[in-house]
Amino acid sequence: HCAALEPFLDICIVSGFSLGAPKSAGNIFQPEVKSLGDHVGRSGLRSTEEHLDAVKHFGEIENTEAMRRFLGAFGWIRKSFPKEVIAVLPALTGQLKKDAVWPMPPESQKAKLALQTL
């Protein structure tokens, strides 16, 4: 394990991650660390519960601005999902166009629910 420590410290220095910060002091060998809104560890990257809850419990989307907020919230957790999730995004991004119909058509509502239940 110590053989990996030197490259890890080099990466920390280059990326600006401070091991002297109060949150990280004394936790140099921890298996998972919270960084930039994600949990990063040996098994990979996963989103925080706060970001997942923001998408799961997002309210009604009644206009273009709300759709932008929803897609922005989903952007935080998108990397945690399989690539197949991209299939439902065109129905939602179509609502950002000038000629979008509000309230959302049924296919857009289904796409929103699909993202929230994943």
Image (tube, helix red, strand yellow):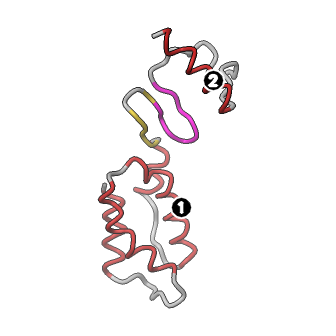
Q: Name the residue under label 2.
A: 23
Residue located 65% across and 29% down the image: 17
**SS assignment at label 1:** helix
Question: Above or below — where is 19 with respect to 86?
Answer: above
The circle drawn on residue 72 is: 1
Distance, label 1 to label 2, CA atoms, is 27 Å
Main structural element of the magenta stretch: helix, strand or loop?
strand
Q: Where is residue 75 in the image (x, y as percent from the top left)?
A: 49, 57
**Is 56 covered by the magenta stretch?**
no
Q: Position of residue 19 (x, y in %)?
A: 65, 20
Residue located 61% across and 19% down the image: 9
Instruction: Give the crowd class for mark 1: few <14, some 14-19, many >=20 residues within 10 Å.
Output: few
Q: Position of residue 64 (x, y in %)?
A: 54, 78
Q: Position of residue 66 (x, y in %)?
A: 54, 71
Q: Nearer the viewer, residue 29 or 115?
A: 29
Q: Nearer the viewer, residue 6 or 51?
A: 6
Q: Which amino acid type corresponds to the residue marked 1 in the rendered image?
A: Gly
Magenta span: 32-40
The circle drawn on residue 103 is: none
